[in-house]
């Protein structure tokens, strides 16, 4: 059974004036084509609820915390993202749901592809059929 999670450490430069995290082009196994972020997510709301056929994404909690449930059709895992120096790499064909956002949470996403609606699988049963589960 293949595990789903892959945590990437973001390099940090510590300084008494404030820390600096660095994301350079070789951090991800792909060239970043799109950057977006989620913020002001209401209490009790969730995001995600889809998978990508081609797009890979790296998720980071820049501020606050949230949980990510990832599912490859066989194995499900839940992880709490609560540090700007830990990123969750989500490969293709992986269902994801983001939930339990803390007040002030900001989720930064570095994606391997620009937006393409055809790349999304938005129904869980369609996802299971697509990955052969």
Image (cartoon, grey):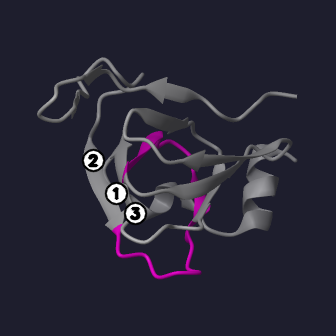
Residue drawn at point x = 83 percent, y = 41 percent: 75
- Sequence-wise, the earlier of marks 3 and 2 is 2
- Answer few, some or many: residues within 10 Å of disc 1's Cα (few below 14, many 20 plus, some between 14 and 19): few
Dividing the image into 4 quarters, which one contains the N terminus? top right
Which residue has dot 1 on it? 115
Residue drawn at point x = 60 percent, y = 56 percent: 67
Q: Residue furthest top?
A: 26
120 left or right, relative to 84: right
Which residue range is magenta in the image? 39-62
Which residue has dot 2 on it? 34
Image coordinates of residue 112 in percent, x first then y, are 37, 38
- Answer few, some or many: residues within 10 Å of disc 3's Cα (few below 14, many 20 plus, some between 14 and 19): some
- Sequence-wise, the earlier of marks 1 and 3 is 3
Q: Is residue 82 above or below residue 14?
A: below
Q: Total number of numbered labels?
A: 3
Q: CA distance from mark 1 to mark 3?
A: 23 Å
- Answer few, some or many: residues within 10 Å of disc 2's Cα (few below 14, many 20 plus, some between 14 and 19): few
Q: Nearer the viewer, residue 71 or 60?
A: 60
Please state which of the two labelled residues, at mark 1 or mark 3, is closer to the viewer: 3
Please state which of the two labelled residues, at mark 1 or mark 2, is closer to the viewer: 2
Label 1: element kind:
loop
């Amino acid at each position: 059974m293949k595990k789903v999670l892959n945590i990437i450490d973001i390099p940090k430069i510590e300084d008494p004036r404030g820390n600096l995290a660095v994301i350079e082009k070789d951090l991800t196994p792909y060239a970043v084509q799109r950057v977006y972020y989620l913020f002001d997510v209401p209490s009790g709301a969730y995001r995600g609820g889809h998978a990508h056929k081609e797009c890979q994404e790296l998720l980071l909690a820049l501020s606050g915390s949230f949980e990510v449930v990832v599912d490859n059709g066989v194995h499900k895992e839940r992880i709490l993202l609560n540090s700007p120096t830990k990123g969750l790499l989500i490969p293709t064909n992986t269902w994801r749901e983001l939930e339990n956002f803390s007040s002030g949470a900001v989720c930064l996403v570095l994606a391997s592809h620009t937006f393409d609606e055809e790349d999304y699988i938005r129904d869980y049963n369609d996802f299971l059929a697509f990955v052969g589960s």
